Amino acid sequence: MFSEGFIVSKIFSSALLCCFLSGVASATAQPLTHVQKNGVPDVVHASSPAVSKANAIAIAMVIQAQLDAFAADDASLAFSYAAPNIKAMFGTPARFLQMVKSSYPVVYRPTSVTFLEPEPDGAAIIQPVAMTDAQGSEWVAVYRLEPVSGKDISWLIAGCVLRAKSPQTWA
């Protein structure tokens, strides 16, 4: 079902996250590094002083999981990471996936992904993510994630705004 490169990439990504969770890797407040393995983006994440390391990792995992679901064309899984406001707006996983394909092609199929420094926004967190599309254009996807209680995941994606790379949007 999945290629060997995809599986190796996901194992590598999981190993990186385990390193962060165990404290082996140290975080800095600098823009983050991304590693590309077999054409699939993997992410190394650092946390902001204002956003805890645990929340920064949890948020990166949610966004990366949704990106992985898009890569696999798994509409139901991608939709499961959406907050109730997004689910109400689109109604079905199929409509949600179609909107992402047509309006957010760089989010649907990024060629590179770099998580930038997250910022608090009340109870929510804003997570900018630098992405490159298939044509080589650079973008910043600004995600808004809201906390969730009583679920397996602690954050859901409540919105995403795309901005073309510019000195003002590139951290």
Image (cartoon, grey):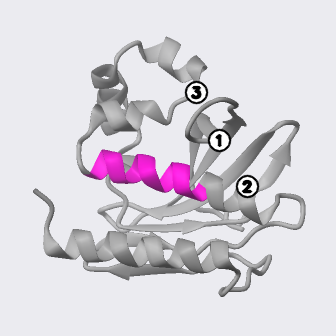
Q: Where residue 83 sits: x, y (%)?
A: 58, 27
Question: Can see residue 169?
Answer: no
Q: Are marks 1 and 2 in contact (CB under 8 Å)?
A: yes
Q: Nearer the viewer, residue 52 or 33?
A: 52
Q: Nearer the viewer, residue 150 or 69?
A: 150
How far apart, in angstroms, are the residues tagged by discs 3 and 1? 11 Å
Q: Is residue 170 above or below residue 150?
A: below
Counting residues from the N terminus, which is met first, the one under dot 3 or under dot 1?
3
Residue 83 got which mark?
A: 3
| Mark 3 vs mark 1: in front | 1
| Mark 2 vs mark 3: in front | 2
Measuring 88% from the left and 67% from the top, which residue is drawn there?
49
Measuring 54% from the left and 56% from the top, which residue is drawn there?
61
* Residue underneath mark 2: 55
Measuring 43% from the left and 73% from the top, which residue is drawn there?
13
- Identify residue type, mark 1: Ser
Q: Which residues are magenta?
A: 60-71
Query: Crowding at label 1, few (<14), some or many (≥20) Cα neighbours within 10 Å?
Result: some
